[in-house]
Amino acid sequence: MTTLTTRRPIRPSGPTGPTRRKRRLDLTVPLFLSPTLLLLVVFVAYPFLRAIWLSFTETSLLGGTLGFVGLDNFRTLFTDPSFGTFLSNSVVWTVGGVGLQLVFGVIGALLLNQRFRLRGVVRGLAMIPWATPSVLVALIWMWLLDPNHGLVNAVLTRTGLMHSPVAWFGNAHSALGTLIVVDAWQGIPFFAVMVLAALQAVPEELKESARTDGCGFLRVFWFITVPSILPTVLITLVLRLIWTANYIDLAYVLTGGGPGIASTTIPLASYLTAYKQGALGSGASYAVVQAAVLAVLVAVYIRLTQRREA
Amino acid sequence: MRHSSWRRAGAVCAALTAAAIALAGCSGSSSTGSAAAASQSTDTSGQTLNYWLWVDNATDQTWQQLADQFNAESGHGKVQLQVVPAAQYLDKLQTALSSGNGPDAARMKDEWIGQFVKAGVLAPLSKKIDAWSGKSSVIDSSWNAGKVPGKSEIYMMPHQNTALYMYYNKKLFSAAGLDAPKTQADVIADAPKLTGNGHYAFDVRGGAGGQDQWAAWMYAGGAQFVDSSGKVTLDSPTGEQVNQSYLDLVKFAPPGSATAAFAQVQSNFLSGTTAMMIHHVGSLAAVRKQFGQDVGVIPVPSQDPSKPSSLQTMSGNVVFTSSKKQELAWQWETWLLGDAQMLKMSTSPQGQLPVTTAVAANAAFTKDDGYQVALKAAQTAQSWPQLNGTTNVVNATWSPTIQQAFGGQSSSAQMLQKLSADLSK
């Protein structure tokens, strides 16, 4: 894309001839933008449009595109009895995981904001779950929660809290809940650090004057701290909702979406359909539905960031 | 357009793409099978073959040693091994082929080839095999593993065969006052007696790879996956009954068995948690190291001992039509079938049953009771039907389908109807 920039005409100083408007092509802006635009087109726009196109085709991994099928993939998707389970799993997974991260992340931030010895070390150690690769997190928890040789079951059964070991990931009633707990364990540090940064920016003099006016800890927290950190919390919340909704690594490694489809979310269904069943067209239709749902969250995120910048 | 509008549009576009980007990245639209091979010359000197494989034992160097030996010989080109983790092998191979970046040749399982043949990506090998002097050295039935139902063309060179059998823990059976099971009725009757005090009868393995031990149980119970015309008959009354007996065993399986993969299954057996395990000679060394003489190797218990059966799976080698080095691929794949190479592979830590008559007669196999059980099982064992839908069932739909049946969300009949439909696709 090129941009035509009209420069303000320079009027001749004396009455020597008619005034002429000069239009010159200024390539500076498009030139500087072109690398970014090129990357966006290649790595964002093309794959995005390609995925939408795929969702209207029958495409297999080995056979290529076999034909245009219109809305058939979407019709199949919405009439699949499993789709309701995928959708509800997605909602429970996203809301549950982010909800736990929000609550414990704020609590963790408040604790880390206190003065105590080795605070810097503790703050650093608290980030370890977030910094650990997802597959490694999955393997750690797979070992800890193993029903026959895992530490958690051993402790719970030997202390009499449970009569027999539980297959946390192998039971349709506990698999998704256990995944949510593992996701929260991994995501709480990120939330805590974001909120901690916001907490450190709360003006101390404001809190001090509130205390002088007779406010106790809870009133200071509610009327001074919460309004100050709320924009950061909201933006972090929306970001985590988007990330968590798309996050499939844990479920893929720990349960594979099972038992049955008990922990299959829409993006995981998209991956399994596209790459395990080799049906790229059907898999793309799941991705398009997911993207449409996420667009709502993206709109909220943009609204929040704009309000903050204003 | 205002600056903020541009930013908003960009952000929406980027976020919408997040879920879709991975799909489109590897959405090659052209059929990889359409690429015609270049004219082949028997002189392959100077060429390098890109060969993909998975290894069954990550610490074992046998494959690399064989490749080094092949490369040291004169008269042909060289082979370069590309090892891909077994769990991702099929996905990566399909993705690479669809994007035009596939290998020249690859290790392959018989249960996968139906889909590859339909896509037209495998080079037909029958003419070369017929003209090959070593054809008669290969056990004749092994060639069937490279064919699809109803066709005589061979697409895969056989290499390592696996017939499933059963291990049983002699101490646990003895403690329960039981003998080794001979029939499936024995297993079902013994299972409650072997379960209790932290011990369990059998891992039903509903997770990755479990379809093979399930198929071995189904075949041993008399179920047929397809009839002589290639029509899927898995959901017959016999199949439903045998499947139900397998589903019932979950009551005597350790927690987590309904979703367990081989690592958990082997761990449970080696630790004495379970009394029986269906597997193959690939685990024989580890099992013997753990139990010594306290482990028994028996055929998979059948419905009728006079009609034994099990599952056999063949891993072999294929050549892709898109390759310009098909002659070198052929040289490598036939070289692997040489007696010395076959013996080295079959007796390695990841070795399975040899597919050549001379090596099968070697004392390493004829004097070992474990190998003897496996070799005898191979005589009556059956394979997964090489249908187009088999890859999908093995790779994707079997696990969730049986897990739902284990959990009582579907019946034996519904489970088999679903699998039959997937096989028939």
Image (tube, rainbow, N blue to C red):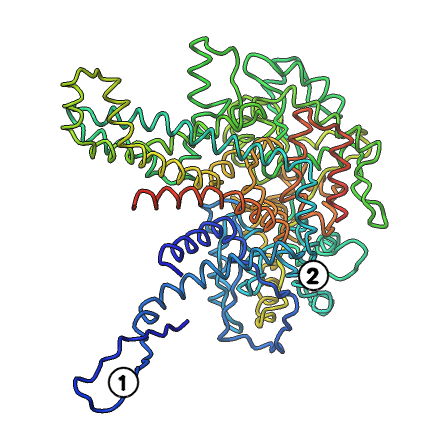
Which residue, given by chain and number where applicable, does mark 1 sit on? Answer: A19
* Residue under disc 1 on the same chain as residue under disc 2: yes
- Residue A89 in percent (x, y) is at 56, 32
Q: What residue type is labelled 2?
A: Gly
Check the image and report above or below for B111 versus B78.
Answer: above
Check the image and report above or below for A188 versus B363.
Answer: above
CA gap between label 1 and label 2 equals 62 Å
Q: In this view, does B116 lie to the left or right of A163?
A: right
Which residue, given by chain and number where applicable, does mark 2 sit on? Answer: A67
Q: In this view, does A204 lie to the left or right of B136?
A: left
- Depth check: give the residue in front, A234 or B369: A234
| SS of the residue under disc 2 | strand
| SS of the residue under disc 1 | loop
- Residue A94 in percent (x, y) is at 48, 34
Looking at the rendered image, the quarter that the N terminus of chain A falls into is bottom left
Residue positioned 69% across, 17% down in the render:
B190
Q: Residues within 10 Å of mark 1 (few under 14, many from 20)?
A: few
- Depth check: give the residue in front, A296 or B157: A296
- Depth check: give the residue in front, A206 or B198: A206
Label of residue A298 in the image: none
Residue B119 visible from this viewpoint: yes
Q: What residue type is labelled 1?
A: Thr
- Residue B383 in percent (x, y) is at 72, 45
- Depth check: give the residue in front, B40 or A83: A83
